[in-house]
Image (cartoon, rainbow, N blue to C red):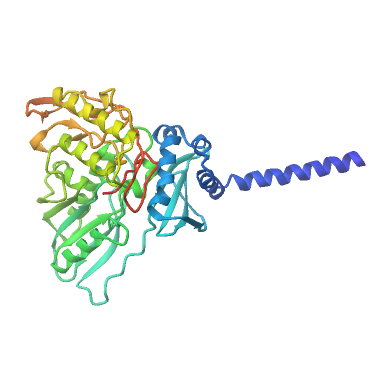
Amino acid sequence: MKRLQAWIAGMATAVVIAAGAAAADSPAALATRLLDQLDAGQYAAAEATFSPQMKAAVPAHKLKAMWESLPVLLGAAGARGEATVSEADGFRIVAIPLAYARDNVLARVVLDGDDRIAGFLVQPPPPPPPPPAADASFSEQAITLPALASGKPGLPGTLTLPRGKGPFPAVVLVHGSGPQDRDETIGGNRPFLDIARGLAAHGIASLRYDKRTRARPQDFSGTFGIDDETTDDAVAAVAALAGNAAIAHDRIHVLGHSQGGLLAGRIAARSQGKVAGLILLAAPARPILDLLGEQNRYLAHLDGSVSAEEQAHLDALDAAIAKVRRDPRRSCWSCPATTGSSSNGSTRWPMRAPASSRCCCCRAAATSRWSMPTGSAGNRDCRGRATASTCTPRSTTWASPAKARARWTNTASPATSMPR
């Protein structure tokens, strides 16, 4: 009888332990454990819970730089809010509010089917946009962009229509870099919402949508490029307007901000004649190679000092740019010198520079490696010579900023970057 009682007690203990383990393995518990490890400075332990892609994109030292920059930007850490869990295509997404002395942010942890952390970003919680006034001269309606040819689902967006008789001219609003929402929310500002409603007051419709890197970070595993992040969805938005009876099909324009402005011509070219014109907001007006060093130096000097690590990165970037200028068939990332992490956290994409300098290069120096196979004719190198080369990614990596001087920090999906 004593043996039976001992066996029963042992089984009961095992059941309790198993139940505790199951509870500990819940999505909310896994996300909470990650935050606990970060708070404790256990960055290597946190990295051990990452998927292989995440480990390559955000190793422990980059995770440390990101996490420890938050108190510098936002003040002392406070309490955490209640975790909420959602699902999308086999991924669990856990959102946990984090309170700091000067602001609040939202931590999002993405878990794959093996309970590994496949994505992690910290960003301001999006405040609800103000509804249109009751007597507004426009209406807003939810819309879903067409699915992509690759099979990826369409993105959620908002169509703003003037009141009255159409069809109306229309504008597609294309974001800058980073996982932006449809309003391009930055702190308490929503520039795309303001633009959309301002246009509507003047009889012009608009379509804005959540960027794929924000709405569906799970779509960015393995190799991906600028078309996956921006171009394809903008083309789908143009197609959505062209198929709407309330829109004047010969008066559809694309408004691109920053990176969106850089890609506006590419979006128009791929829209098969549906785009009547382009509007560029803060788009690069000079060659990419000129901007790379300038942008990185500006960010490194924002706090009044440049660390040895940052200076090493800047020196490596200068060396890489010099090599590309001498031999435009090379990319920045094929240069051995570019082994440091980027100080601005920009995503690495294959890009063609503006027509004034059709150089095959990318936006920021980091650890990515790029190949240059023969491609579309008509490109030009840094010295204006015709070349048939175009950049394509051989692998994709991401680096978080060592010193971010902004009100938020995005990290951990290779699809993310610091908004600007």
For this view, does 334 lie left or right of residue 216?
left
Q: Nearer the viewer, residue 253 or 400?
A: 400
| Residue 150 falls in image quadrant | top left
In the orientation shown, which residue stands out farthest toward the front? 305
For this view, does 420 lie left or right of residue 59?
left
Residue name at image x 44 percent, y 51 percent: 107
In the orientation shown, which residue stands out farthest toward the right? 1
Q: Is residue 72 visible?
A: yes
Q: Is residue 267 visible?
A: no
Give above or below for 134 relative to 255.
below
**Disc count in the image?**
0
Residue name at image x 13 percent, y 41 percent: 269
Q: Nearer the viewer, residue 254 or 243?
A: 254
Query: Residue 13's x, y, as percent?
Result: 76, 44
Query: Residue 11's x, y, as percent?
Result: 78, 42
Give above or below for 163 relative to 58.
below
Q: Nearer the viewer, residue 59 or 307?
A: 307
Query: Residue 304's x, y, as percent?
Result: 28, 45
Residue name at image x 29 percent, y 34 percent: 311
| Residue 312 falls in image quadrant | top left
For this view, does 362 lie left or right of residue 386?
right
Q: Nearer the viewer, residue 235 or 416?
A: 416
Query: Residue 402's x, y, as percent?
Result: 36, 40
